[in-house]
Amino acid sequence: MTDNKEPVQQDENSIILERRSKLKEIREKRIAFPNNFQPDSYAEDLHLKYDGDSKETLAKKSINVLVAGRMMLKRVMGKASFATIQDTSGRIQLYVSRDLINSGKEPELYADFKRWDLGDIIGAKGKLFKTNTNELSVEVTEIILLTKALRPLPEKFHGLSNQEIKYRQRYVDLIVNEDTKQTFLRRSKIISEIRNYMQSNKFLEVETPMLHPIPGGAAARPFKTHHNSLDMEIFLRIAPELYLKRLVVGGFDRVFEINRSFRNEGLSVRHNPEFTMMEFYAAYTDYRWLMDFTESCIRQVSKLVAGSEKIEYQGKLIDFSASFDRLTLVEAIIKYSKEFSEKDLNDKEFISKTLKKVGHELPIDSGLGAYQLALFEEVAEEHIWNPTYIIDYPIEVSPLARTSDENSNLTDRFELFIAGREIANGFSELNDAEDQAERFKSQVKAKESGDEEAMYYDADFIRALEYGLPPTGGCGIGIDRLVMLLTNSASIRDVILFPQMRSET
């Protein structure tokens, strides 16, 4: 392996040395990194506007443009050459003629151009025309080297194929891989359409703290640091939930936040310690309303971004147009495992023995609900492909959710699963301050027993509830995972511009 890579490394080093030598020569002649060129046109706009014109029609219009971008292709042919530049929107071809660009001031400009390298960033002024092959191009009258690239781009036929390098050097990945670029353009559109949907439904966008004196809003291990001026321990937020509910107490009936959250957990194809969620809260609603609203939101975003309510993900169809299924934990386990009866799933000892067979053990004082959830995660979750709400979660695994009126062991809570992974989590909010205080106390006991993901006691949040939280529904949607679905991406790292990686050293 090392022997195969060594020559490549040496070649790259020699290229870098050669380019540094060119840069040195440039520094001796002129300003090496000029900042006096401003383009007035983008490649995509020019193609959309003029690709349909004939060669003759375009010549009559006599359109002058200023364009800039990274040189991706170059063909030198004696007194005239072609180059292709890439800007943020796409690519356009330049026709560079010695007779047109050489002047009294810079008689050697064409010779200099021939020595410029792929990856260099250049600016050009000229007239639009069509080549004999009908390709829209710029007949260059002025050209300038704006930035000398010292490192070569990946070899054009192989591109940037090493997955780890793509994640570490996303800047290169975006230059050479159009699919990557399109993924993140679509991600931006997804977030934009979610924001539009929320605002059109009278939700107020807000910002809540990312630094929390007490981590809360989810069962997760937080990142912690120290605030020097205040001399106190402080945590990166694991969820914005408790602050958003404080705002509902304050009278903002509908709020949402597209937020960054942080959880000190492992890395996987579906987990990154820093991730994006959209959380929203609506007064005078419940978890059933939330399910309908979340379903409608996802359906609308899919239609606007993917162009259809039916998408393909990893070779299989996902249909957002049909009503999402709704199953309890027990119903889902029976449906997807087919080896357990309802009687089995109400037998804590039976489930415990089943879990031990796959190396999954729970604290001895865990209730039946915790065992059912653990079994669901082991045998059913990954098999749920079509959009499905798992509803009526046990109270012991839902410390912030309202207790069901029909069954005091359950809560008015759901989780949405699509393609084998959780996409959203929502519930009717617990607005009983005394009940919430007791659940916090139970979480503290669990933490003292060694559960690092258990919640802290948040006295200020209890105080807020004591002022009165109206009946409220709240939900969090995992933006990264939703983007994975709508861009047909297999890993969460494919949809995060700069995913967390191990240190290179």
Image: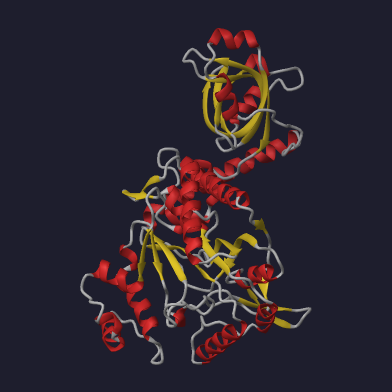
* Residue at 66%, 63% in the rendered image: 253
Task: Work out which quarter of the rendered image holds the N terminus and state it.
Answer: bottom left
> Residue drawn 72% across and 69% down?
250
- Closer-to-camera residue (307/8): 307
Q: Is residue 375 above or below residue 300?
A: below
For image coordinates 43% across by 54% down, the residue present is: 163
Query: Residue 73, image x and y in percent?
Result: 51, 30
Quick one: 150 or 446, which is closer to the camera? Answer: 446
Q: Could you tell whether 491 is left or right of 354 in the image?
A: right
Residue displayed at 37% across by 77% down? 373
Question: Is 155 placed left or right of 93 in the picture?
Answer: left
Residue 227, how many percent across, how many down? 72, 78
Residue 177 appearing in the image: no
On the picture, is 360 further left or further right than 280?
left
Task: Give percent across and percent down for residue 103.
Answer: 73, 17
Q: Residue furthest right?
A: 229
- Is residue 499 visible from the viewing direction of this image? yes
Extreme-left residue of the structure: 339
165 lies above or below 459: above
Task: Identify whether 61 is placed above or below 500.
Answer: above
Q: How is the image coloured?
A: secondary structure
Q: How many marks?
A: 0
- Direction from residue 370 to residue 261 in the image, left or right: right
Q: Position of residue 261 (x, y in %)?
A: 58, 66
